[in-house]
Image: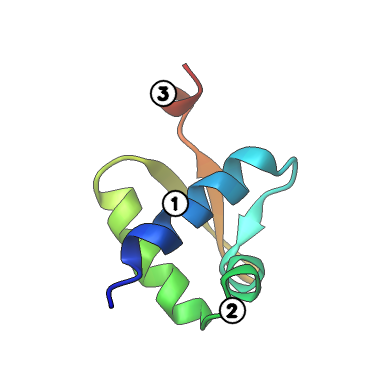
């Protein structure tokens, strides 16, 4: 079973509901998966302009795009 959609939705909900910047380690723990899998999914979300990401100390930090908040 492909879990990309459910993981992508989980990532976007966590980002939108959090007041803090999220990273792949935190998101992976929440989804109970490996941080590298989270980074693969976030790369896909970034490619279609749903999120933007910046490199951080503990992996990839994620920020919601402003257009999603409109």
Q: Which residue is mark 3?
A: 67
What's the distance in space between the residues labelled 3 and 2, CA to CA?
29 Å
Query: Which residue occupies the extreme top position in the image?
Result: 70
Q: Categorize mark 1 by other alpha carbons within 10 Å: few (<14), some (14-19), many (20+).
A: few
Q: Which residue is mark 1?
A: 9
Residue 52, compared with residue 37, is above or below; it is above
Percent position of residue 47, x then y: 25, 50
Q: Marks 1 and 3: CB-CB under 8 Å?
A: no
Percent position of residue 59, x then y: 57, 71
What's the distance in space between the residues labelled 1 and 3, CA to CA?
16 Å
Residue located at (51% from left, 55% from top): 11
Find numbered disc 1 in the image and state the secondary structure of the residue it sits on.
helix
Q: Earlier in the sequence, mark 3 or mark 2?
A: 2
Query: Which residue occupies the extreme right position in the image?
Result: 19
| Image quarter in which the N terminus is found | bottom left
Query: Mark 3 or mark 2: which is in front?
Result: 2
Q: Marks 1 and 2: CB-CB under 8 Å?
A: no
Residue 30, compared with residue 33, is above or below; it is above
Q: Quadrant of residue 32?
A: bottom right
Q: Which residue is mark 2?
A: 32
Query: Mark 1 or mark 3: which is in front?
Result: 1
Q: Earlier in the sequence, mark 1 or mark 2?
A: 1
Judge from the rendering whether residue 58 lies leftward or rightward of residue 40; answer left or right.
right
Residue 9, compared with residue 32, is above or below; it is above
Find numbered disc 2 in the image and state the secondary structure of the residue it sits on.
loop
Percent position of residue 56, x then y: 60, 63
Residue located at (64% from left, 55% from top): 22
* Tally of marks: 3
Residue located at (43% from left, 69% from top): 39
């Amino acid at each position: 079973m492909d879990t990309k959609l459910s993981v992508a939705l989980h990532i976007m909900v966590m980002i939108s509901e959090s007041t803090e910047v999220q990273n792949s380690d935190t998101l992976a723990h929440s989804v109970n998966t490996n941080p590298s899998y989270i980074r693969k999914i976030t790369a896909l979300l970034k490619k279609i302009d749903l999120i933007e990401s910046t490199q951080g100390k503990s992996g990839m930090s994620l920020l919601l795009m402003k257009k999603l908040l409109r």
